[in-house]
Image (cartoon, rainbow, N blue to C red):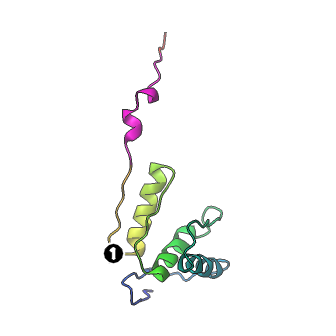
Amino acid sequence: MEKTTRNGFRVNSEYQPTGDQPRAIEQLASGLNAGMKAQTLLGVTGSGKTHSMARVIEKAGSPALVIAHNKTLAAQLASEFADFFPNNAVEYFVSYYDYYQPEAYVPRTDT
């Protein structure tokens, strides 16, 4: 089911928020509108955090920067957001800085 908004961000999902999600979405969106600089969404694996984030982006009506702590999660989030927002640009950037840090290379020997 696709929900249309005036701001151009529409979540494309057959699922609607359930359980604690509607309240979390409203609180996060209200926090954004109030100018809160930091908010945290906590939930166990599979609880719908990404879907909730997509709904907050939809309500906010503005582009979002989502930061992940590892490249695997970043790729997963990019894929899911691309599915949630098929009519919007979803970009995926990762840093390869760790490949160029000499201290990241620890000399070892197998002898």
Q: Identify the residue at horizontal 55%, vertical 79% (top origin).
A: 29
**Where does the image place residue 36, in percent across and percent down from the top left?**
58, 72
* Depicted 45 relative to depicted 23: above or below: above
**Where does the image place residue 84, in percent across and percent down from the top left?**
42, 74
The number of numbered discs placed on residues in the rendered structure image is: 1
Secondary structure under the numbered disc 1 in the rendered image = loop
Q: Quadrant of the N terminus?
A: bottom left
Q: Identify the residue at horizontal 43%, vertical 81% (top origin).
A: 61
Q: Nearer the viewer, residue 7 or 80?
A: 7
Check residue 101 for magenta coloring. yes
Residue 107 appears left or right of 42? left
Figure quadrant of residue 80: bottom left
**Where does the image place residue 97, in percent across and percent down from the top left?**
38, 40
Figure quadrant of residue 42: bottom right
Determine the residue located farthest toward the top in the rendered image.
111
What segment is highlighted magenta in the picture?
A: 95-108
Q: Which residue is mark 1?
A: 88
Q: Residues within 10 Å of mark 1 (few under 14, many from 20)?
A: some
Q: Amino acid at mark 1?
A: Asn
Q: Identify the residue at horizontal 44%, vertical 49% (top origin).
A: 71
Q: Nearer the viewer, residue 49 or 1?
A: 49
Residue 92 appears left or right of 104? left
Check residue 59 for magenta coloring. no
**Where does the image place residue 20, in percent across and percent down from the top left?**
67, 77
* Depicted 95 relative to depicted 89: above or below: above
